[in-house]
Image (cartoon, grey):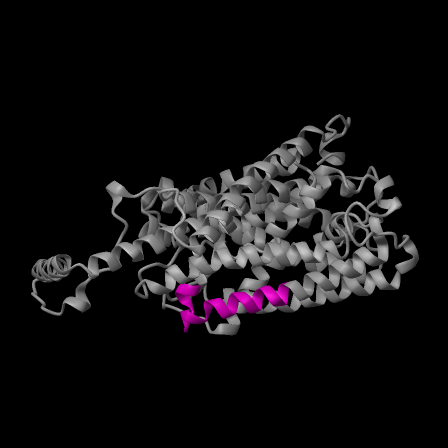
């Protein structure tokens, strides 16, 4: 989900702690719950949760560096991840953060569209060979209404928070129904999952431990917790931004509880027979239909919100002066044109990367690895070294005097430019921006203390994960069978 910073009248909105908590949880869990049973069955119902906690710990530590950098800047200095990257590391880091954030939103669209279309097909339960059973029909049935809604809803209003609270209720209901359905039909499949990957004759015979499966399962841990894409924006609009660390930790604990309940019940009950995702294997009764209807709501809402964000990116790039309140024929045609690239990209990816686990792998490989680990670690490195440099300057007598005189002169000049000279230097000094001529995307490669060692480890881990997951996604796409005579109804 996306963050709203103003209501329908343009008035600034401040979020309380619990509202930001709900937004964080719903942003990460809408389409993630259904992946956990297969993930734990593949990695082992003991090893899987341990690895999940380890991945979450790395993500939270990386996000701590990012949040702390934002908190130590004057309030209002940053409101987006891009702003923070520019303030701390310069224009190159800000550009990388913007590109990764936009890419994530763009790739989330086909992933959520895939979830919606599959869930709709399950609910309809049409006879094979009929038009209603055709995959592309279900895809278009979800995509076209979202495009039409986007033509009217062009920005986020104050209702975003209420949608997050409703989505929180939907997520809890969905988890409960999945667990109920699995336990009610526990005898459908043998309980043959192993506690650790590599163990269990049934799992080895089924090919569960292939390298591609293991990498796909590991990539899910980056997909199901990726707070970097909204957390800076959330901190900027929180009533008490200093509580962002607590909010993120509690959100991660809540998500871990939901993931463990659904994942462990599915893996230990249905064993290696559990598919990815699990919602399509639930018996077609009231519980299974309810789960898939709730998935359509959650994933469909994420698709709609991501579409609005991507359309806004295109509009800002091509026509920054466009009036979003212009609903004339010309204005509607222009906005429709701005919305087409993201939707076309989503449809193409759904057609040629039809497996959900492969789509998730594409997102995590190209956006989540850099966004969740590498970029936060780089921001932390830049901020730590900037603080050291400022401290050195502040402790040098000559520098102290020159800094004070320079600040006073700058303040006086700004006051003169505004028609009123001020001598209140502290009130006039603007947040320091990284020196552009000397800014670097990656700081000088050296380790000065234990914290920098952690930051370099996380940054390099993100790059290694990106390379491994790109290779895995390429392998999955290359080995997909596209030879069906009815491609759009069977393969898509």
Q: Residue at x 74, y 64 (%)?
A: 261
Residue 284 relative to residue 26: left or right: right
Query: Quadrant of residue 52 in the image?
Result: bottom right
Asked if residue 239 lies in the magenta stretch, the reply is yes
Q: What is the magenta segment's predominant secondary structure? A: helix
- Do we see residue 218 in this rendering? yes
- The answer to whether any part of residue 14 appears in the image is no
State the residue in front, 117 or 226.
Answer: 226
Residue in the picture at 79% in, 42% down: 208
- Residue 304 in the magenta stretch? The answer is no
Question: Which quadrant of the rendered structure holds the C terminus?
Answer: top right
List x then y, in percent, for residue 217: 69, 47
Q: Is residue 369 above or below residue 227?
A: above
Say which of 432 and 456 sits in front: 456
* Residue furthest right in the image: 187
Where does residue 42 sit, x and y in percent of width and height?
Answer: 76, 48
In-front residue for pair 281/241 = 241
Q: Which residues are magenta?
A: 235-255
With 36 as the anchor, is 427 left or right in this view?
Answer: left
Which residue occupies 82% across, 47% down? 199
Looking at the image, residue 126 lies above or below residue 349: below
Label total for image: 0
Above or below: residue 148 compared with residue 206: below
Residue 228's spot in the image, x, y percent?
49, 55
Q: Is residue 282 left or right of residue 379?
A: right
Is 29 placed left or right of 263 in the picture? left
Q: Quadrant of residue 473?
A: top right
Q: Position of residue 2 (x, y in %)?
A: 49, 57
């Amino acid at each position: 989900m996306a963050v709203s910073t103003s209501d329908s009248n343009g008035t600034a909105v401040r979020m309380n702690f619990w509202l930001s908590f709900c937004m964080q949880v719903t942003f990460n869990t809408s389409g993630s719950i259904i992946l956990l049973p297969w993930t734990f069955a593949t990695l082992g119902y003991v090893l899987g949760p341990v690895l999940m906690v380890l991945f979450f710990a790395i993500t939270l530590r990386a996000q701590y560096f990012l949040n702390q950098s934002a908190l130590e800047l004057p309030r209002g200095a940053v409101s987006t991840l891009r702003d923070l990257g520019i303030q701390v590391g310069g224009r190159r880091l800000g550009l990388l953060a913007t590109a990764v954030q936009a890419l994530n939103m763009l790739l989330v669209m086909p992933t959520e569209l895939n979830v919606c279309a599959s869930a709709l097909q399950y609910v309809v339960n049409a006879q094979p060979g009929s038009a209603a059973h055709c995959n592309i029909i279900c895809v278009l049935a979800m995509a076209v209404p979202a495009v039409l809604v986007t033509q009217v809803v062009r920005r986020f209003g104050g209702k975003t928070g209420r949608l997050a609270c409703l989505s929180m209720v939907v997520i809890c209901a969905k988890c409960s129904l999945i667990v109920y359905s699995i336990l009610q039909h526990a005898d459908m499949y043998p309980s043959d999952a192993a506690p650790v990957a590599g163990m269990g004759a049934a799992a080895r015979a089924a090919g569960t431990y292939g390298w591609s499966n293991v990498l796909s399962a590991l990539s899910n841990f980056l997909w199901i917790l990726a707070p970097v894409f909204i957390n800076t924006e959330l901190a900027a609009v929180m009533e008490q931004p200093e509580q962002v660390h607590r909010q993120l930790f509690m959100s991660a604990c809540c998500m871990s509880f939901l993931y463990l309940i659904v994942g462990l019940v599915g893996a230990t009950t249905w064993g290696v027979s559990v598919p990815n995702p699990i919602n399509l294997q639930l018996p077609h009764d009231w519980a299974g239909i309810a789960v898939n209807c709730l998935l359509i709501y959650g994933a469909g809402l994420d698709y709609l919100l991501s579409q609005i964000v991507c359309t806004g990116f295109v509009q800002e790039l091509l026509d920054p002066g466009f009036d979003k309140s212009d609903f004339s024929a010309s204005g509607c045609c222009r906005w429709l044109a701005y919305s087409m690239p993201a939707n076309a990209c989503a449809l193409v990816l759904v057609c040629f990367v039809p497996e959900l686990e492969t789509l998730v792998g594409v997102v995590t490989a190209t956006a989540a690895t850099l966004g969740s680990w590498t970029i936060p670690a780089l921001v932390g490195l830049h901020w730590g070294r900037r603080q050291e440099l400022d401290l050195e300057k502040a402790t040098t007598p000559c520098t102290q005097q020159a800094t004070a005189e320079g600040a006073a002169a700058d303040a006086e000049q700004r006051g003169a430019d505004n028609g009123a000279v001020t001598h209140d230097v502290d009130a006039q000094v603007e947040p320091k921006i990284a020196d552009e001529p000397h800014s670097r995307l990656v700081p000088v490669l050296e380790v000065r203390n234990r914290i920098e060692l952690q930051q370099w480890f996380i940054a390099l881990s993100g790059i290694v994960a990106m390379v491994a997951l790109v290779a895995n996604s390429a392998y999955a796409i290359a080995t997909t069978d596209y030879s069906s005579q009815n491609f759009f109804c069977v393969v898509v």
